[in-house]
Image: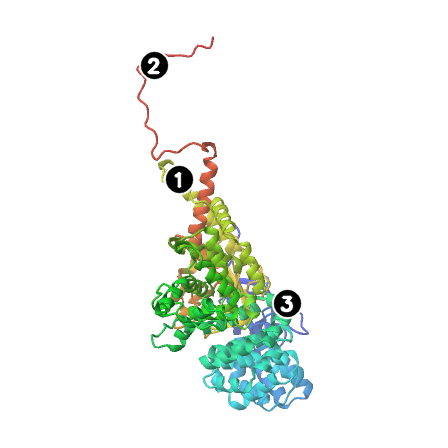
Amino acid sequence: MPPMKDANIVKIAVEMTDQVPQLIEFNQKQPLAGIIQELCNGWNLTDPEQYALQFNENNNNNYITEKNRNEIKNGSVLRLQYSPSKTAQDILLKLNTGSPEDKATAVSKLSVLSADITFALDFINKQGLTLLIKQIEGAKCKGAVLAHTLLSFVELMEHGIVSWDILNGEFISRVASLVNTPQEAQVTQAALSILENVVLNSTEGYGQVEREIPIGSLVNHLQSTPVVQQNAVALINALLSRADITKRRSLVATLTSKQVRTVIQNNILQTGAAKGNEMAHQLYVLQTLMLGLLEQRKMTKMDPQDQDGHDKIKELRRIAFESEGATSLRGPSGFTRDYKKLGFKNDINPALDFTETPPGLLALDCMIYFARNHPESYTKLVLENSCRADEHECPFGKASVELVRILCEILKIGEPPSEQCVTYQPLFFTHDHPFEECFCICIVLLNKTWKEMRATAEDFQKVASVGQEQIVRALETTPASLDQFKSKLHMLTYNEITQLWQLERNTREEWESHAKPVVELREQITPDIMGLIKQQRLAFLVEGTRFTKYSPRGQRIKDKFWYMRLSPNHKVLHYGDCDEKSAPSTEELQSKIAVCDIKALLVGRDCPHMKGRKASHQLAFSLALEGVDLQSLDCVAPDEQALAYWTDGINSLIGNRMQSKETEKDLDTLLSMEIKLRLLDAEGVAIPQDPPPIPPDPPHYHFCYDLK
């Protein structure tokens, strides 16, 4: 019988510059210092304490420590390098006293090593960060050296070791000047990233950045390379998120001006620059923050003393019923009749229609915008309904209030931006009042749908639900302009919507029959279907998912990703860093945890990395571990489906019931399909609620069949 293999020993190769590689057995229980001593002896090197082991992979050059040594696998190739402490000392020496060539080499090396927290700790402890700050403040470098210096600074700060509050006004001014003047793309990219972090994380820094960076400067960078564009939009978003309501309105007014909209259209939306996930996310955040300005009006009730509101209501009546230049001679009773024709619920005092929030005064704002900017469409819509019988008229006032509420719900007005969403609507970057223009298009559609449905007052909610479905389906196509949105809505007629609903019902038909045979059949095949769902979930985990990295403060890190996948034998989870488009194999992922070490699955606010955070937590989940150094593996899923699949898969691995909405949906769909297949032979046969009774026995059994 062969001897048992020691699981703590892996066979690896170790390289070193100008040396013959060594093949060794790496014992995970042996101290690293002892292993390095043996390697140094093999190469006749003195001072082993000056050396350290380093991963030697494409996307992982981190130093090996006691915390990450478990990532070493059989067949790994490591490098013996100078230790983080000595490397940091050498870089600092060259930065302080070296020649220009030495400084350029040192800062280039620093920009690579700064991503490793082990090196970052040593470099910062040796006052390396302070030196970088002084060099940036003193404008002592330029070109590629300046780009690498700024990039190193960003990488060092993102570890969360040092607070952004350490930066003084002189440093911020210097970085701001790099943004305001033409520079190499790498310099501008890093400078924009620094200012974004200052705005978001520094107590005092926002005010200075807001004063020193004119919005026009950032707009100019929207015409640069994709990464600079992305970082410029990210800084705009940061400034918007920290600004007070007055300043935010001013910024949005500039961003929605025709000049800026043209820049965004020509340089981002029409060039394909927005196809990357990070740029799409930044555009989504920008859209959310711009539309968020409507929340105040959405949540404001109309005050009985609000003269401006009353004037707007009177203007709605005047535009609809008084010819240009004419003066109304009607008394209060005439006004009441007009307000009734306008479709207000409270025709005596229409102001009461705007006391419900949402949509509050935002509904009145949209109505008056429609009347002022599209008077012909407005007058036609109102007068057309005035000529109908009372029970068949589409009440403009009531419909407008409901439509604005629907639009606020669909567009999630007032909700904070999700940290994972990458879905934005290009049409909101094509007009200075995109929400109001959407309302104008949709209110005409709602009136058209009302006529197509031949609706009466009792059908109001049905028409509203159809209208909501039309808007949602039109926006799902991501129309590039308001005209495309309008065309798509007109294609989605009431008949088209009913046909789509019918088709969807037929394809996903839920078997709602309560017939006993069908119920028993469902119970019989449910375990098999759940087994299929479990297989699919585990296959999804084996295929793996790319997650966005988060800083120790819980902030999303741009363009930093990691990948996790389940081993084919379903016993180990492998994870490690990756880029935006790669899907590393299990062999390429450095870290792993055994499924048997997972103690529990935590979701949402229960996750350790979500406690005390204001950010969105809906997509967060954590694996609570036991028996290993790592307490938990914290994740934020890229979307709701990935969250459902991962939580289902983990639950099935640790013996818990899969309980996501996706599981319920898949179970219903697969059950429906399986039952329909099994009942094909019974098509056209009415299945009774209860099985038919068994007939009584015959009086005797003396019968036969004569074949003659």
Residue type at mark 2 is Tyr
Q: Residues within 10 Å of mark 2 (few under 14, many from 20)?
A: few
Judging depth in this view, the residue of 621 and 498 nearest the camera is: 498
Taking 682 as reference, is 326 above or below it?
below
Total numbered circles: 3
Name of the residue lying farthest toward the top: 708
Residue at image x 56%, y 84%?
214
Q: Which numbered disc, 2 or 3, marks the residue that appears first in the sequence?
A: 3
Q: Which numbered disc, 3 or 1, marks the residue that appears first in the sequence?
A: 3
Location of residue 336 by image quarter: bottom left
Residue 524's tag is 1
* In this rendering, position of residue 488 left or right of residue 670: right
Q: Circle 3 sits in a helix, a strand or a loop, which is it?
A: loop
Badge 3 is on which residue?
270
Residue type at mark 3 is Gln
The x and y percentages for residue 218 are 58, 80
For the residues marked 3 and 1, what is the alpha-carbon distance in whole angstroms? 54 Å
Location of residue 43 by image quarter: bottom right
